[in-house]
Image (spheres, rainbow, N blue to C red):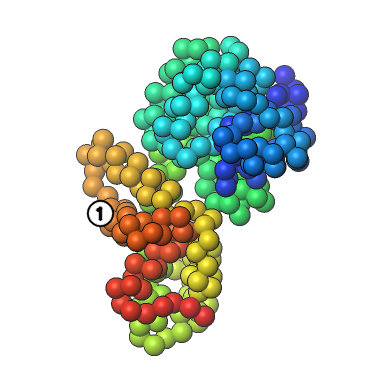
């Protein structure tokens, strides 16, 4: 089937899903959409999406169904429960789950999808809302190569990097690795900036001095300006990073490995969530250090 003639379903129009769906519409795809948030549906409808009343209806009208949901239970519900995708999908339908979930759940869901006559790819993303908006997300995919090649052109309309890592579940395992690295990077950046501020050294100048050297990173360039501006509006919420690190801890336990650094940052994030900062951007990890040391990192 010609790629643009494929009808695409999109379930989950949240902070990430909404701009991703809009980018597919801009690229000329026909999109059947569903979300429990009616305002989000209306916004994507205005951009050309066709609203559906259930996930099953989306599946019945689509050749490929994309899901972008908060966590494992939401994806299970959207696929397996009453009015779910499996209830409405035709044989040969491809499901691409772009949510960040437990890799073992991806494996479990793929078995159910295959038994129902479909195919599945797990394809979580990295990049947060800014990269969802400008279609430069990184996709980490798991599944069969021939299925991946069918959906790759669609994913490339939402991202600048689309990589097949291995079999089903590999995408989400890669995302967990990504989230460990991002979390530890933000904590290290926060620790260093608070040390500078407490020592009487201008943290903005420290950032400018080190960003071009070995310590520089995409994480630093994305998060240091937010910290310095005291802007903790979410690109990626602390509560979602807690979810990802919890999934990482579960995955490490399954293979008998400890994750001491990830565990420490998870502890910090949980403390901030208890203090009411769960919906803040994960750059607010700096607040953990600031509260302990009685200083504030700012321009």
Q: Quadrant of the N terminus?
A: top right
Residue 38 place in picture, x, y as percent: 62, 38
Residue 94 place in picture, x, y as percent: 58, 22
Write down the residue under mark 1.
260
Residue 68 place in picture, x, y as percent: 54, 37
- Position of residue 85 in the picture relative to residue 135 (left or right): left
Which quadrant holds residue 295?
bottom left
Residue at 70 percent across and 24 percent down: it is: 7
- Asked whether the viewer can see residue 185, the reply is no
Q: Is residue 116 above or below residue 144?
A: above
- Asked whether the viewer can see residue 35, the reply is yes
Q: Is residue 29 above or below residue 109?
A: below
Q: Is residue 200 above or below residue 258?
A: below
Other-residue count near label 1 (Cα within 10 Å), few / some / many at <14 / 14–19 / ≥20:
few
Residue at 53 percent across and 19 percent down: it is: 83
Residue at 47 percent across and 40 percent down: it is: 70
Q: Nearer the viewer, residue 52 or 211?
A: 52
- Position of residue 258 in the picture relative to residue 162 (left or right): left
- Position of residue 135 in the picture relative to residue 163 (left or right): right
- Position of residue 94 in the picture relative to residue 284 (left or right): right
Q: Nearer the viewer, residue 156 or 130?
A: 130
**Residue that lies at the very extreme toward the front in this rendered image:** 38
Residue 84 place in picture, x, y as percent: 52, 21
Q: Label 1: state its secondary structure.
A: helix
Q: Nearer the viewer, residue 177 or 236?
A: 236
Q: Is residue 269 above or below residue 9?
A: below
Residue at 48 percent across and 59 percent down: it is: 281
> Exactly how many numbered labels are in the figure?
1
């Amino acid at each position: 089937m010609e790629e643009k003639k494929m009808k695409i379903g999109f379930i989950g129009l949240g902070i990430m899903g909404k701009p991703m769906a809009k980018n597919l519409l801009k690229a000329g795809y026909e999109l059947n959409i569903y979300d429990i948030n009616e305002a989000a549906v209306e916004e994507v409808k205005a951009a050309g999406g066709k609203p559906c009343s259930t996930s099953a209806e989306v599946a019945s009208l689509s050749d490929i169904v994309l899901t972008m949901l908060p966590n494992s239970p939401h994806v299970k519900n959207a696929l397996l429960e009453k009015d779910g995708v499996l209830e409405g999908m035709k044989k040969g339908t491809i499901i691409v789950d772009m949510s960040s979930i437990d890799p073992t759940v991806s494996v479990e869901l793929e078995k159910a999808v295959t038994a129902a006559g479909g195919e599945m790819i797990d394809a979580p993303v990295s990049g947060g809302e800014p990269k969802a908006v400008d279609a430069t997300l990184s996709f980490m995919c798991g599944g069969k190569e021939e299925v991946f090649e069918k959906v790759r052109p669609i994913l490339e309309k939402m991202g600048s990097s689309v990589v097949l890592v291995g079999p089903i579940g590999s995408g989400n395992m890669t995302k967990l690795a990504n989230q460990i690295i991002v979390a530890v990077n933000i904590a290290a950046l926060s620790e260093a900036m608070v040390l500078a501020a407490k020592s009487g050294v201008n943290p903005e100048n420290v950032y400018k001095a080190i960003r071009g050297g070995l310590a520089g990173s995409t994480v630093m360039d994305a998060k240091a300006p937010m910290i310095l501006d005291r802007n903790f509006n979410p690109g990626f919420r602390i509560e979602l990073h807690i979810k990802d690190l919890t999934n990482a801890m579960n995955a490490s336990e399954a293979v008998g490995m400890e994750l001491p650094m990830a565990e420490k940052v998870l502890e910090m994030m949980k403390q901030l969530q208890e203090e009411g900062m769960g919906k803040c951007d994960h750059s607010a990890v700096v607040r953990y250090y600031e509260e302990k040391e009685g200083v504030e990192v700012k321009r």
